[in-house]
Image: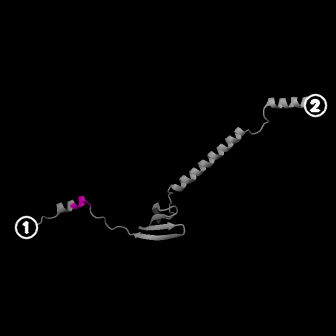
Amino acid sequence: MPAAIACGALASSAWAAGPAPGVSTAQVGQIIAGLLVVLAVFAAAVIVLRRLPLVRLARNGRLKIVESAAVGTRDRLLLIEVEGIRLLLGVTPGHIACLHVLTPAAAAPPGFAQHLQQVLNAPPRPSQADA
């Protein structure tokens, strides 16, 4: 019987000292919550970076992506400029097609101010009453 008493005394002293050193369930919960926060931040960063139009610089300067527009989840329209000529391209995962070639515009039509100046500087026409 003294061995049983000694065991009981040993168990009660361990209980009074607290749990054995190690990781508690609260700490495990904090570690899991921290891991989930890091994964959520990483996923959000990936989504944001995929949505942002990245600036693509051509190294030689002859090819420029002027504008890009998403048509579907994996389809895009690209307006590129090569040596002064603009090309409208349709881009899909398996195919690239030239949809339209935009040549550089000739001289722009005169604006209202230029047209008014031409009219004011033009020589007067003979009126019909003079004829």
Q: Residue at x 46, y 71 (%)?
A: 98
Q: In this view, does 7 lie above or below 89?
A: above
Residue 82 locus on image (x, y percent): 45, 68
| Marks 1 and 2, how far apart at CA | 138 Å
Q: Quadrant of the N terminus?
A: top right
**Residue occupying the point 46% across, 67% down:** 89
Q: Look at discs 1 and 2 and give the one toward the viewer.
A: 2
Q: Mark 1 points at which residue?
A: 128
Quarter of the rendering occupied by the C terminus: bottom left
Instruction: Kindly indicate the quadrant of the structure image that contains residue 23.
Output: top right
User: Compared to 114, does 45 lie above or below?
Assistant: above
Taking 60 as reference, is 46 above or below it? above
The answer to whether one can see residue 42 in this image is yes
Q: Nearer the viewer, residue 91 or 5?
A: 5
Q: How is the image coloured?
A: one colour
Which residue is labeled 2 in the image? 3
* Extreme residue in the left direction: 130
Q: Which of 119 and 25 is in front in this view?
A: 25
SS at mark 2? helix
The residue segment tinted magenta is: 111-115
Q: Where is residue 104 in the image (x, y as percent from the top left)?
A: 37, 68
Q: Helix, strand, or loop for circle 1?
A: loop
- The three-letter code of the residue at mark 2 reads Ala
In the image, which disc is placed on residue 11? Answer: none
The reply, left or right, for residue 7 in relation to residue 72 is right
